[in-house]
Amino acid sequence: MINWRDGVVRSLGRNWPGAVELEIEIDGTPAAVRALAYPELVGAPEVGDRVTVTTTALTRGLGTGGYALVVALPDRLPVDPPAGPGHIVKARYTPLQTMVLGVDEQESAHHDVLRDADDLAGLPVVVADLHSALPAIVAGARLEASRAGLAAPRVAYVMTDGGALPAWFSRTIGALRDADWLTATITVGQAFGGDLEAVTVHTGMLAAHLVVAADLVVVAQGPGNLGTGTMWGFSGVSAGEAVNAVAVLGGRAVASLRVSGADARERHLGISHHSLTAYGRVALAPADLVVPRFDGDLAPLGARVAAQAEVLRDAPAGHRLVQVGTDGLMDALADAPVRLSTMGRGLVEDPASFLAAAAAGVHAVRVRAGS
């Protein structure tokens, strides 16, 4: 069931492409509540507007979905959008289902390019479990390109629907676009709000290759991953499925390991069981599994990660373990145009997490350069 509330907008807060924060006063509640609106769906709220919101996750105190979410401005509904191409419905059969133009559908200007497309031509595709890996992967890729005397890579992000559905929720995506670190976001499955929309991970990656002309692709779920503390009940299972999709299309899968030196949960310390399961059991095709080589204070953790990775070497998929050094990556990560955060921890609190992702970006550029 959904918790429905009515309220009034008291102030507007931060905004970024596709989203705006606001403070609302819910009827019968004196304290202000933080809310989020997607203007593309509900219109642009203004101070004094009456709003209808849902508060289910907020009421439960969850991090995922922990806003009051604006469903409507009942006194000032947006005008109907103009008629146009596109018949793909995302968030299907929910009250906020939205219609988009898919890059791969018949009405798209790119349909002819994608209709029979079936080959990524060795394009490196970095697969990651968490959305928070995205800026770190790009930081590593840009550093390696600079060290090799290459232009900064054109990076396409294929965002799957394992976390947030609206790409607009992510401040990271907007900031990376503003900094020219990200060329395009392609939302696939039930995710929406990217620069391009696609039906599947497969057509999303093909669009990244043939429409965006990306030098490398990052595939990961949107923010707000789900885990249940069970072997199979986590949304990152899709990372293994993405590896299979890359192989089917003739790409070069580069697996970014989910690593932590600070997580209190044993199953996530070193290499997370999410990576061990997704790459070790779900992936049926080989990938380059990037094992970060840690030095200094992180050396003991590096030894643990290297030992855990040996399990993946023996996985049925026949993965290739690739050790990548982390020299220079801390400075590159510190210079990222977005705040790095994973599971509530920043670069200082859990450097290994971001270094592991950045190492995957380094290797992807080396693959692209043929080294």
Image (cartoon, rainbow, N blue to C red):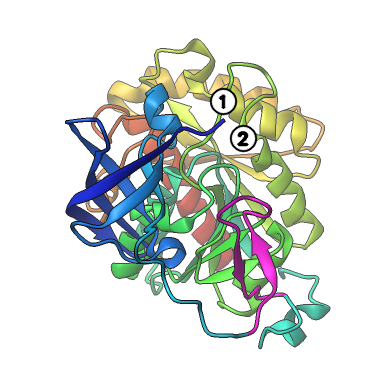
Q: Are marks 2 and 1 in contact (CB under 8 Å)?
A: yes
Residue at figure coordinates x 58%, y 16% from the top left:
229
Residue 202's spot in the image, x, y percent? 73, 61
Q: In this rendered view, identify the residue nearer to me: 197 or 313.
A: 197
Give the quarter of the image for residue 145. bottom left
Magenta stretch?
85-104
Crowding at dot 2, Cα within 10 Å, few <14 / some 14-19 / many 20+, comes out as many
Residue at figure coordinates x 56%, y 25% from the top left:
227
- Is 93 magenta? The answer is yes
Q: In this rendered view, identify the residue nearer to me: 280 or 346.
A: 346
Residue at figure coordinates x 51%, y 33% from the top left:
258
Residue 272's spot in the image, x, y percent? 54, 24
Residue at figure coordinates x 32%, y 28% from the top left:
350
Q: What kind of element bears circle 2?
A: helix
Instruction: Establish if 178 lies above or below 361.
Output: below
Residue 71's spot in the image, x, y percent? 44, 51
Picture disc at residue 227? 1
Q: What kind of element bears circle 1?
A: loop
Q: Is residue 254 visible?
A: yes
Q: Which residue was labeled with disc 2? A: 235
Kind of residue at disc 1: Gly
Q: Is residue 294 visible?
A: no
Q: In this rendered view, identify the residue nearer to me: 175 or 327.
A: 175
Kindly report the secondary structure that dominates the magenta region of the rendered protein.
loop
Residue 27's spot in the image, x, y percent? 27, 37
Q: Is 269 on the left or on the right of 370, as rendered?
A: left
Instruction: Establish if 259 lies above or below 206.
Output: above
Kind of residue at disc 2: Ser
Instruction: Establish if 93 lies above or below 78.
Output: above
